[in-house]
Image (cartoon, rainbow, N blue to C red):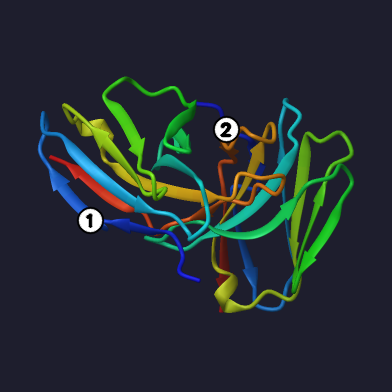
Amino acid sequence: GQQLNQSPQSMFIQEGEDVSMNCTSSSIFNTWLWYKQDPGEGPVLLIALYKAGELTSNGRLTAQFGITRKDSFLNISASIPSDVGIYFCAGQLDFGNEKLTFGTGTRLTIIP
Amino acid sequence: KAGVTQTPRYLIKTRGQQVTLSCSPISGHRSVSWYQQTPGQGLQFLFEYFSETQRNKGNFPGRFSGRQFSNSRSEMNVSTLELGDSALYLCASSLAGPVNEQFFGPGTRLTVL
């Protein structure tokens, strides 16, 4: 099945560092969503982006919707231990079409 | 407000059997989508139900089916289980309006032996 290109695949950082990950697609999406998933749980919505060029923050998280609507990035500032998990981007083509196409995920590990 | 709930959380079946999974959306949400998550294929869209009608469908065989009830609760059925059906099955609900934020349940972990 189709997946978005998400990078990096994994990250090993120290507590307090900033994190950046991005997602690209060959398709234009109307909506970009960023989720975090902990082991054995469902994805939790972090940020939703609806307009090309939109920059949205949620606490230490900042995400941007690319101008071309084919990419998005997520930044996490001053990482803390609870940021550990797998981050997924997801694109939605049209309003009224609830299908989400997911990225391959970025696994974030914090080194003590 | 309660989140999306899924039952059961864990299920073990053998090849050839069938299974039914249940999802209760967030109150007021009318759209329910189902996803399969595996290490190899990641998160893949199965189908979406809105107002008791299947509105969108992913690329899965006909062994995968679902339905939605008038209270928006949804069930997913997999018949003639195969080993490759072992996965985490996730349900997500949304208002299905101009703001299309989907909220996921904890998932049902299906193991096929």
Task: Give the side of residue B90 with respect to residue B76, left or right.
Answer: right
The residue carrying mark 1 is B10
**Which label was assigned to residue B74?**
none
Which sits in the foreground, A74 or B103? B103
Q: Is B78 located above or below residue B92 in the figure?
A: above
3D distance between C-alphas at marks 2 and 1: 26 Å
Q: Is A51 located above or below residue B47 in the figure?
A: below
Name the front one of labels 2 and 1: 1
- Image point (33%, 20%), residue name: B61
Which residue type carries mark 1? Tyr
Which sits in the foreground, A5 or A48? A48
The residue carrying mark 2 is A3
Task: Give the side of residue A100 with respect to residue A31, left or right.
Answer: left
Q: Name the image quarter holding residue A107.
A: bottom right
The x, y position of residue B19, in whole percent, is 18, 39
To which chain does the residue with label 1 belong? B
